[in-house]
Amino acid sequence: DCSFSFPLIVNECFFSGEIFPSDTDVPGDIPTWTTKLILKGRNISTLPQGAFTVNGTDMGIVSLRLPHNRIRVIEPYAFLGLPRLSLIDLSHNQLESISARAFHGLPELRSLFLNVSVLPCATAQLSHALSAQSLHNLQRLELAGNGLTSVPLERLDKYSLSYLVLVNNSIENIERETITSLYEQRRMHVYLALNPFRCTCDLKEFYYWLKNSSQCLDAGRLICSEPEDRRGTPVDKLRAEDMDCVTENLETVSYVFLCIVLALIGVVFLMVLYLNRKGIKRWLNNIREACRDQMEVYHYRYEQDTDPRLANVAV
């Protein structure tokens, strides 16, 4: 289904899985002058190299939307032949494998959407696929709902990002290196709501960045999930003393010091026992002999008068 403008030029094509329920490949009859392409509800499992080229000819596609297509694998240079491509939407797929060169050859790419698409087995591959080398002009990246535990971008200062969406993941804290990069990239805006933040003193750098910066556009929706006494508390409503690690560190040091002292006392006690083993053995032998002599005395008296009460009765 393609829409037209005048003069007769195809601007947008839409292919639905409801029309092609058994199709597992990218359509091969896409007009080369198409600028917007939407494929939805199909059974495309793999995007091979040059999946959108027609007879090796470059396409003029600017916007490519591929939601709900059950895509599992993106091979190297899958989008080769799309030099004008500025937007890719791969949301709501089932990505198990993402090549480190999946997005190579896209100098004009500005927006990439991977919401609810990356399975746990592909999380480790994601950071390599999102390398700054291939996405240095990227301005908007959406990774909501993927169960991520950290920001999958190694050096934020190497990107041109304006918006980074990490909503509804499993992020408990933001690494210090990432916070430093965010301070340097003041024009970058981040969305972090619906993540289970662990509000201990380890969150200190992130907490102060949140209080001193306006880069997190949903800062008021960040909620603590742990520890128990802070569960449900907005992160930006915590007190500065809650982020003070001195008290916790002092308690830790105190326990460690106590354990060391007890261990030293135990070692000294064992050394004393070892050095005085002969004297202790002699002392134990003396006690044993004394106990034996005392028992012999009682035994002798018993033999002499087995029951003094019987003698009293006889009298």
Image (cartoon, rainbow, N blue to C red):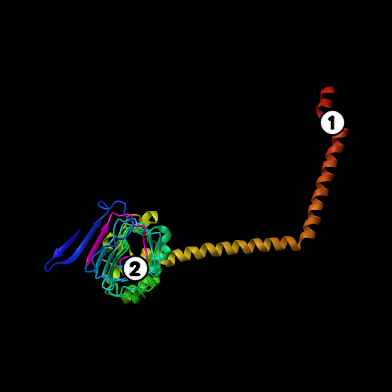
Residue sitting at x 15%, y 64%: 4
User: Of 31 and 18, which appears nearest the observer?
Assistant: 31
> In the visual, does 1 lie left or right of 68?
left
Disc nearer the start of the sequence (1/2): 2
User: Considering only vertical position in the picture, is 196 above or below 5?
Assistant: above
Q: Quadrant of residue 107?
A: bottom left
Residue 105 appears in view: yes
Residue 190 appears in view: no
Magenta stretch: helix, strand or loop mostly? loop
Kindly report the distance in space between the C-alpha atoms of the residues bearing marks 1 and 2.
111 Å
**Residue occupied by mark 1:** 306
Residue sitting at x 66%, y 63%: 267
Magenta segment: 34-52
Q: Quadrant of residue 299?
A: top right
Q: Looking at the image, which residue sits at the far top?
A: 314
User: Considering only vertical position in the picture, is 166 above or below 300?
Assistant: below
**Residue occupied by mark 2:** 50
Q: Looking at the image, which residue sits at the far left?
A: 6
Quadrant assignment for the C terminus: top right
Quadrant assignment for the N terminus: bottom left
Q: Count up the numbered dots.
A: 2
User: Of 257 and 136, which appears nearest the observer?
Assistant: 136
